[in-house]
Amino acid sequence: MRPIPTRRRSLVVAAAVVTTLLTAAAPAVGGATAGVRAADAAPAASSDGGQLQSRSMMPDGAPDSPAAVAQRQAHARTANACAAGSAPAASGSQALGVDVASYQHPNGAAIDWGAAARSGQSFVVVKATEGTTYSNPYLTGDVNGARAAGIYTGAYHYARPSSAAGSAAAQASYFARAYNALHGNLLPPVLDLETTGGLSAAQLIDWTHTFLYQLQSLTGRVPVIYTGPYFWIDNMANTTGFTRYPLWVAHYTTCAQPMAFGGWKSWTFWQYNDGAYNNPPAVPGIGQSVDRNRFAGSKAQLAALNIGAFHGTASRSAFPDGSFVRVDGAAPIYRIAGLAPVYVSNWANVGGPKPVKIISVEQFYTLRATPLDGTFLNASPRGSVYRVAGGAPLVVTNWAKFGGVKPYVTVDAAAVDHAGQNGVWSHLNALPADGTFLNCAHSGSVYRVAGGAPLYVTTWSAFGGVKPYTTVDDLAIAYAGRGGGYNRLNYYPADGTFLNGAQSGAVYQVKGGHASHLSSWSLVGGIQPYTTVDQAAINNAGKASFWSHLR
């Protein structure tokens, strides 16, 4: 692993550890006054400057070379301005973990995951891939061994942002295949971003958007970004455009919190030590020095990020709308809406404590990942109403548009506000799934969602006839992306979205709201996931009214 160069610079240290983004760490609903608990972390420290270490995971261009490790371990460090200490201030509630690559298997040596678990390691993130050619030969063995020892597992991709290493979409696809092949419960997939490949900041930002969009579409999980503050500031222009993704920050310091950057208000994981900084004791069972990490919450809270696939085979008789469930041995409580578990952060938001049905993990995964399309939700306590379409809650401004009040489920407003985030919040999508058809209740206009945006449909024949659709409030589309409840649709498709014109068969890639014709899939590393749309939406891009969702 190679270090990100360390420099002296003024800084602002993050003051909060856990926000709603991570409330994978949200506590159980325990009583009439229970709610989301404050973060169990050391108070933030401040600094007027000082040496703060950021570093990288292990690249495999020359796979996990001892020379790279020696360079990292010999890297000069100076005292920083925070209070002295050999490691960041500890919090007993924060789960500890490691990340490993082939370097941790010198001469093919195995890792004793049982010993690692007994030493207090709660999670491990294993390197899976690099570029489009390298796969870690120890990936499956480490994941299975750690799982057997009771350690939560995940996987990461070491990014090579250059055309020689494959496009962003091709690298994401390569990683997704390895990640999905692990099956079972996993922590979210991780993009390890610490090299530029010679790209400018604007190019690297575009590359990263494309990679993350592709990865999420192929895994169904919101990815985590691993990076260091100085790399992000210097090479990503300190962009604040990625805060919807959880942050895994690499930053070595004796301060109580890592440095704040990129608009993130908090971190989900913190790599606070590379196994050499301040000479920590070895991790039992791992023969080489290894990175040390914290999760912004307890091991029980970490469990909410360690999820698998939902089957959607549950029945309404077993899980009626409005009922409350909790998995045996776990803390979070959910309210059933459209056969999906919608998280309850505070009993007060759903009318006070109610009877809760205790279910098994197996029963939990018979539920749907998101509520059935068409489900109406009343977000309590504010009383806002939403209709689920493509798994996302689209705002309803007036019941009259639906012929009067319809059956609805009262849910915790926090679940709507945090839709699309990880863990317990993941049972509502931030945006409707691509391919979702929307019918405007008042005008009757039809749209198909692509890259989170509604693209106009002129004729059902373009799709072989009428398809299942969800009737929604016209204003949810007209005001898409304008803030508040209207942010559950993008106004323009997300950068990197691929469109296929239904009538022409032509393929386009969206950048900055503009659909650029793609002459060959080979230009983007091969066929990528795409959404078929009405060709007229592309041909009339930039015109007024319903054509305005493409530039």
Image: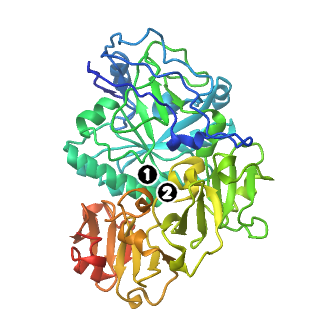
Is 461 in front, or is 483?
A: 483
- Answer whether labels 2 and 1 touch (C-beta < 8 Å): no
The percent coordinates of residue 537 (x first, y second) are: 29, 79
Left or right of 50, for residue 430: right
Q: Please, what secondary structure does the residue beneath circle 2 have?
A: helix
Tag 1: amino acid: Phe
Q: Which mark is residue 337?
A: none
Mark 2 or 1: in front is 2
Relative to 320, 398 lies left or right: left
Report which residue position mark 2 lands on.
219
Residue 461, position as x, y percentages in the image: 40, 91
* Rendered residue at 35%/17% (across/down): 47
Label 2: how many residues lie within 10 Å, few (<14), some (14-19) or many (20+)? some
Q: Amino acid at mark 2?
A: Thr
Is 46 placed above or below 517 here? above
Image-quadrant location for residue 518: bottom left
Residue 498, quarter of the rendered image: bottom left
Name the quadrant of the C terminus.
bottom left
Residue in the picture at 21% in, 77% down: 543
Instruction: Left or right? Give the position of 397 relative to 505.
Output: right
Q: Total label count?
A: 2
Is 401 rendered above or below residue 426? below
Residue 175, disc: 1
Task: Please tell me whether residue 452 is drawn above or below residue 63 in the rendered image.
Answer: below
Q: CA distance from mark 2 to mark 1?
A: 10 Å
Quadrant (top left/top right/bottom left/bottom right) for the N terminus = top left
